[in-house]
Amino acid sequence: MKIKKAVEAEVRMVSLAKLAEALRSLHGLQEEGIVTKEEYTSLKERILRCIADVVEGGVEEQSTPFLGSDNNEAYARIPADLPKQPIVGVFPNQKEKASVVEVASVVIKRMPSVGGKEHDEHDEELAFAFEGGFEDPRKATEQGKENVGSIRADAPLVSEGVRPFEGKEVASSKGNAALFPSGASFVRREAVGEVALEEARARSVGDIAFMQARAVGEAVLEEARSFGLTGEIARLFEGEPSAALWGEMCVLFRSQKGLDWEALNVQLDQRWPDRLRQAPVAWVEELLRGERGPWWSCVRALDIGEEGLGRSLKMVELQMLTRFSEIAGVRSVQLSKQKMGAQGARLLVDSMWSDLRRLEIGGCALGPEGLAILLKGNWPKLEVLSLWSNLLGDSGVRLLCEAPWSSLRALDLSGNAVTASGIERFVQAGWPVLERLRLAWNKLASAGVHALMLRSWEKLKVLDLGFNWMHDEGVVALSKGHLPALEVLDLTDNGVGFLGANTLAQSPWPNLRALYLMRNSIAADGGKSLARATWPLLQRLDLRRNRLGDAGVIGLCSANWPTLQHLDLAGNDFGAEGARALAYASFPILRTLLLGFNWIGDDGVKVLAKANWPALEVISLERNHLSDASVRWLQEVPWPCLREINLSMNPLTPEGLAALEKSLSARLQQEKR
């Protein structure tokens, strides 16, 4: 439940102001029935314990960097049931392997100023692929992917977008920002961008922009008042659309009297994307109890999947929801992991949701029989269809080729045991505007990739072929295909070696922005080959666990990728020589550098600490055999945007960590002055 998660996120903020705000918000949500009594009690206890830690000095009241300690009594009192994401912050790909106490002792995170805009870049990561809604079947098997930012010529360090292939929205470009909605949209505020803004204001450019923005805001406020919005809700309507703002508006909708709901919906349709206009779970439960209200006319998205609803949905309940006239205007439906089978498919086809544009029914045990029924659905505007892990097989794919939905732009068929035979039929279907295709966790092998490339894919931007064991032969077949618009390519865990890497480097994909090659075997020669690739827009490269060694990293660092923002070289068995090459590489806007599980050592950190990375925000050095000598070097790093250092699983002393915390705190205070 999104609102509940937002409150839990507040619990992790080390700030009295934020914790107090969370407590007030939680109380309001409980009064409105948006969180249950049990959830309210549990979350309230967590918040109060964190407040006690702050008051007792165990955790500093923060707008400065904070570093936990294994010996910190406050952390010893943190409840064992707190989410395994520490108060100080941790990469999402660690939260299944480290406890709060363990991670808090080795992660430094620069906290946002009290009262400033909150953000969690690692919960709303940037990419051009499936963000909100598409549940990824590989979640339990692989560490999460990180940010891919969207570079604009006018603001190269300000990015917006979403998490890659992790199940929420797509933002491959400004024009497609609303294609895969469902989670909260996210806009990152960069330190470099703020400096540029200040410079603009100094020339009065910023002041002009501010006046224009205020004029627009005042106009929106007048519009809100014109159809009955008053007080707090009118102020909220004026704000930038977001999931959090929508949650607040949902609470207030029910207290407004005399609203012109029809006029309100006209304005909402103009300013608010469907993905944000999601019904709170409490509303859904009330509707199932027969409690109705005019506010339902504002809803455009319905998350009744097992995770969103928090329980399994009975068939009689699904039948009720599909027939309620109050939600006939729903355009996005999430039903993932509700084992509805063919019976549920029949209810969807007979539903009142004639304007459906997004349907997510992954893990619903449809099988070919259920899919055949689903294909009778009269949804001419359907753009997004997620069918992952539905036991479809090749027969199901053949049925799908008869789908009447010519407007389909995104399709997820991951985890359906599809082979080359099914793909041969798949490519014969129309798919005239398909932009995003997920075929991960199938049985394609090289023959399936060859079959996929038998046709031209003029508009395809995102292609996920991870975990298909295609080997180098599959990469060669892929390179011969026609993919002029390709931006994101995922080849995770496919047995790709040097030949495959060399083939990729010569592939004609001028728009490529993200390449995922983790858990392959390209080795040193493959790293050298990739460096010769001409990808002028490349922003993310994931080479985790590829046995590069020092030679491979050195070769890779000769690449000319001026737009690279995220580089993952974890688990590649390189040391100080590879670190030296990285320090002198030309990656001018690098933001995230993941170097964990290598052999960099103190000598490597000494060189890295002198690198010129003006935009670097996150560096990960976990398990690199570092001592307190590395801490001394890290105290002097010339990285003005640094927000997070991960030093997990290194033999560092409490004294060394305390010194690093003190140094970074002093730097931050100096920057503020």
Image (cartoon, grey):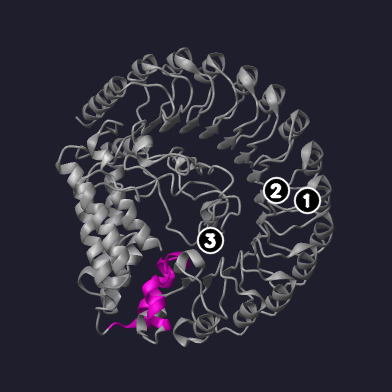
Residue 2 visible in rendering? yes
* Pointer 1 local density, CA inside 10 Å: few below 14, some 14–19, many at least 20: many
* Mark 1 touches mark 2? (CB < 8 Å): yes
Q: Could you tell me what secondary structure mostly forms the magenta stretch?
A: helix
- Please give the residue where the numbered disc 1 appears in the rendered image: 444
- Does the magenta portion include 281? yes
Q: Is residue 85 left or right of residue 64?
A: right
Q: Provide residue 196's location: percent of width, then percent of height.
A: 35, 36
Task: Examine the rendered structure and indicate whether residue 121 appears above or below residue 621.
Answer: below
- Please give the residue where the numbered disc 2 appears in the rendered image: 465
In the image, the segment drawn in magenta is 259-288
Tell me the quarter of the image containing the C terminus.
Answer: top left
Tell me the number on the disc at residue 608: none
Q: Quadrant of residue 273?
A: bottom left
Tell me the number on the disc at residue 133: 3
Tell me the quarter of the image containing the N terminus.
Answer: bottom left
Q: Quadrant of residue 478?
A: top right
